[in-house]
Amino acid sequence: MKDLSIRRIVRELGQALLPLALALAVGAVIILAIGENPLTVFGLMLRGSFGSLRRLSGTLQEASPMIFTGVSVALAFRAGLFNIGAEGQLLIGGFAAAWAGFALTGLPGPLHVVFCVVAAAAAGLVWGLIPGILKARLGVHEVINTIMLNYVALSLTNFLVGHPYFKEPGQIPQTRDIAASSVLPRFEFLYAHAKVNAGLWVALAVMVAVGYLLARTRYGFEIKAVGYNPEASEAAGISKSRVIWTTMGLSGAIAGLAGAEQVLGVFRCFVSPFPFGYGFVGIAVALLARNNPLAVLPAALIFGALTSGAQEVDVHSGTPREITVVLQGIFVLFIACEFVLRRKRRVGETEGGPKAGGKGREEEGRGEDG
Amino acid sequence: MGDSGVALFFMTLLVSTLRKATPLILASLGGFFSEKSGVVNIALEGIMLFGAFVGAVVAQTTQNPWLGVLAAAGVGGAVAAIHATASIWFRANQIVSGLGVNLLAVGATIFLCEVYTGGQRSFMLSVSEKLPRWGPFLPLVYIALLMVPVVYLMVYRTRQGLRLRAVGEHPEAARTMGVDVQMTRFWAVVISGVLAGVAGSFLPFFAGSFAKNMTNGLGYIALGALIFGRWTPWGALAASLLFGSADALQEMLQGRGGVPSQFFQMVPYVLTMVALAGIVGRAIPPRALGIPLRKE
């Protein structure tokens, strides 16, 4: 395949890593401005994320949900859809996993885990289908809807956690503990109480499956065609609306799995407030991976390392750990601009690439005239 | 409840609604400027958060609340300028750029808060008592209400306003008529940031403290109010009042049984989706929204 030429790989790497380098440079200036040494801080970050087996496992643990959400967002991007709703899909999926975890009893271990994982995927699927169907049938742009659904999911799960049927008696707002048979085992062979769990294998499997789907199947081809040029693919006999709602649903299901990983592997119940931010970081991960599912792994490891290294920074320097969120934000800003550099370079293909943002609303406005 | 009880309930609800609606009104007017010019602004959320933090710090440090509001306006405009520069001249994906601003805001405000307080993620604001009260409200409420007709007149009754609308509906035609599309958009986004920054600065004054991530989706609700209000200033006002009343009811009914407060929290989000889907009359965005101007 000519796509895999060395030149292309180098170019793609450069375009992904340049914004990252720029973000680190701006981060260094910020650290200097508060009177700290950026080299020390970055050194601490590296040590905190890769310095020992325990720290490395912390990085893998942070990366696990990011692989799910990164793949989820990247898949949607390939169809020209912008899934900002991974955050909400993760919440709903996590809650469903917790429910299946404590409500179903008497199942043998592996089967119970499968049930919980399927429940999470199904719940995420539903949460992804809502904006997907609204876009496919009514042409409503998915960005606003997915943002709104994040907050609907937050309120809904907050309500459910407080409901007597789900709630663990006592003061702490969390659901009852899941049955032992539904727990995703932790990597105890690394060291006792390692947080990283078998959810990582699920994440990698999903990542490879989506990579295969996009590269080798007819449906994957349709997704890419619709993302590349919706009108032309419609003319070629691909149902644009079917691709839109199925891809959005699939993307939601994958983000829902991130919630299952957190519930079955880490907390063993649904806690409120649930960890926040994996959905949004998933967008940064997908952008860094340039929407290539297999590149999501290194991208998630980079962002996972940033997050897990933050603790070391907090403890051993005067720099607040939020420097990592600042770096993520700056990186996303830089990569937003970079989007364009790529398109400019490939003149004649200006209509290509996922056109999330704007295009949908444009269609919507036009549709109103007809 | 007796008659006087009912009257008291509605008076409290009305007062509380106006308070809750105040930041929404200003921020949605801000969104109106940006989106009317053709630039999607989901960065409202992050700009409000920056405004809340900087406003609180400056007010507390100088012991002058008005300087806090002014500083929030400045930082709001500056942050919006980043989004505008990326969106207009670098033709960045406006959603990605807005998300970048929002992520940056969450990180930067906590980061700076810890630097400012020496490790805390919130701080009390003694200065909010220095704001005068006009009747039941802080002056901020009246400022927000006054801005609605001001923005209406600016956008629908002035030359600049006409240019702004032209740029958002049909940028190519506007350019042919000699309008500098990119500068018009830039200033629209900056004004949008100024309004959202001021809106954000109200939050710590109302709460008496700054807390991490204190906007908590309010910027997105403001964007929803703009959409539910059909991209018009009066509509945004009405939607802000409606969303504000849902929030006020939620607070008043908390712990009373009946409808759980979480369902009131969902109201703005669900109504926005309903408005976009066109179940009760469709909300139509400016035509060139989200589309950068192409070079000739």
Image (cartoon, coloured by chain):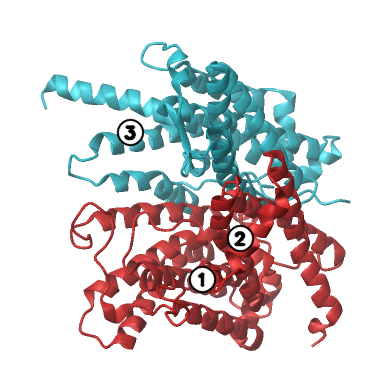
Q: Which mark is residue B269?
A: none
Q: Nearer the viewer, residue A363 or A29?
A: A29
Mark 3, chain letter? B
Q: Earlier in the sequence, mark 1 or mark 2?
A: 1
Tell me the kind of residue under disc 1: Arg
The local secondary structure at tag 2 comes to helix
Asked whether residue A332 appears in the rendered view, the answer is no
Residue A284 sits above or below residue B227 on the image = below
Q: Is residue B69 left or right of residue B85?
A: left
Mark 1, chain letter? A
Chain A drawn colour? red
Q: For the point 63% across and 33% down, which residue is it?
A: B76
Q: Nearer the viewer, mark 2 or mark 3?
A: 2
- Residue behind mark 1: A54
Q: Nearer the viewer, mark 1 or mark 2?
A: 1
In the rendered image, residues at marks 2 and 3 fall on the same chain = no
Residue B147 sits above or below residue A288 on the image = above
- Residue behind mark 2: A306
- Residue behind mark 3: B248
Residue B30 lies, in percent from the top left, at 59, 33
Say few, some or many: other residues with alpha carbon within 10 Å of mark 3 (under 14 / 14 to 19 / 20 or more). Answer: many
- Do labels 1 and 2 touch, CB within 8 Å? no
State which quarter of the image contains the N terminus of chain A: bottom right
